[in-house]
Amino acid sequence: MPNQPERHFIEAWSLINRKYLGKGVRVKRFRRPTRCQIRNRVLLAVLMVNDIKLSELAERLSVSSRSVSAWVYEGRLPGKANLEKVCRELGYPHHILFNQQVIHNSPVICQQEPSRFMKRTITRSPVRNHILTGLCMVHDLSVTDVSHWIGVHPGTFRKWLHQATLPSPAFQEKTEQFFRIPKSVLFADCVLGEDEQSQA
C-alpha cells in the first residue's frame, strides 16, 4: 500500500486534533506563575478578587499588556500619569498598590502544608477586604488553613474578609508576619471603609 503524501497526513491529524482534543478545554483567566515570579502581590490580589484580567486592565488604562505584566510580575513602577490612572481605576492610593516594601520583599510565605483557595469564599458572600482575600487567592490558600496558621478562629477570619472587621493589633501583627506584607496594606480596606463612612 503506497504511503500517503506528507501533506495529507498532516491535514488528517489536524482534523482529528480539532475534533477531539479541543473539546472541553477551558482557558483560565489568570496564568499560574511560580510564586517567585510575582513581585507585586497586592496589585495581583486586587485584580484577582475583582476578576480583572491583566489585559482588561491594560485596555481600560490604554496601555500595553506588557506594561501591566511588568508591574505585577517584575515589580516595575508605572510612570506618573499611568500611576494615577491605575490608582483611580482600582480605588487605592499608590502607597498601597505599589508599596515598595512589598515589591522588594520575598513573596515566599511560611505555609505549613499544601492548601487550596475555595471559590465559594467570594461567591457565597460579598467580600469587603479585597486585598486580604486576594492574597489568599494569589497564594492559593484556603481561609480555614490561614486562620489556623495565624491562630484565629475561621469564623473570625471570615469577618475580616467579608465585613472588613479590623482585628486586634496582636492579630494584625500575626497576619503581617504570615503574609510578609505590612498590616497597613493588609487591612487598608478596613481603614478606607471607615474613612468613607465618616465622610458620609
Image (tube, rainbow, N blue to C red):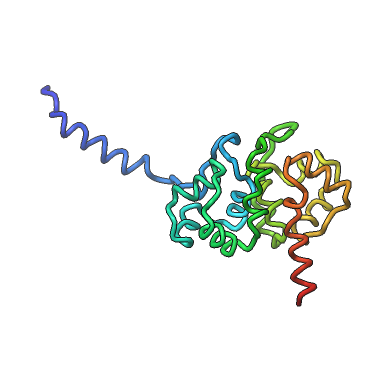
Taking the image as shown, residue 67 lies to the left or right of residue 45, namely: left
Q: Is residue 118 visible?
A: no
Residue 107 screen position, x and y as percent: 65, 37
- Number of numbered callouts drawn: 0
Residue under the point 69% across and 37% down = 115
Residue 83 percent coordinates (x, y): 55, 57
Q: Is residue 59 above or below residue 180?
A: below
Please state if 59 lies on the left or on the right of 18 as rendered.
right
Residue at the outermost left position:
2
Residue farthest front in this picture: 80
In the depicted structure, whether residue 58 falls above or below residue 116:
below
For image coordinates 68% across by 56% down, the residue present is 130
Asked whether 42 or 133 is in front, the reply is 42
Percent x, y of residue 67 = 47, 49
The C terminus sits in image quarter: bottom right
Instruction: Place residue 74 in its image quadrant.
Output: top right
Residue at image coords 13%, 24%:
3
The residue nearer to you, when weighing 74 against 130, is 74
In the picture, measured across the screen, residue 60 lies left or right of residue 46, that is left
Residue 60 shows in this picture: yes
- In this view, the residue farthest toward the top is 1
Quick one: which residue is furthest to the bottom in this view? 200
With 99 as the anchor, is 169 left or right in this view? Answer: right
Q: Position of residue 108 (x, y in %)?
A: 67, 34
Q: Quadrant of the N terminus?
A: top left
Residue occupying the point 62% across, 54% down: 46
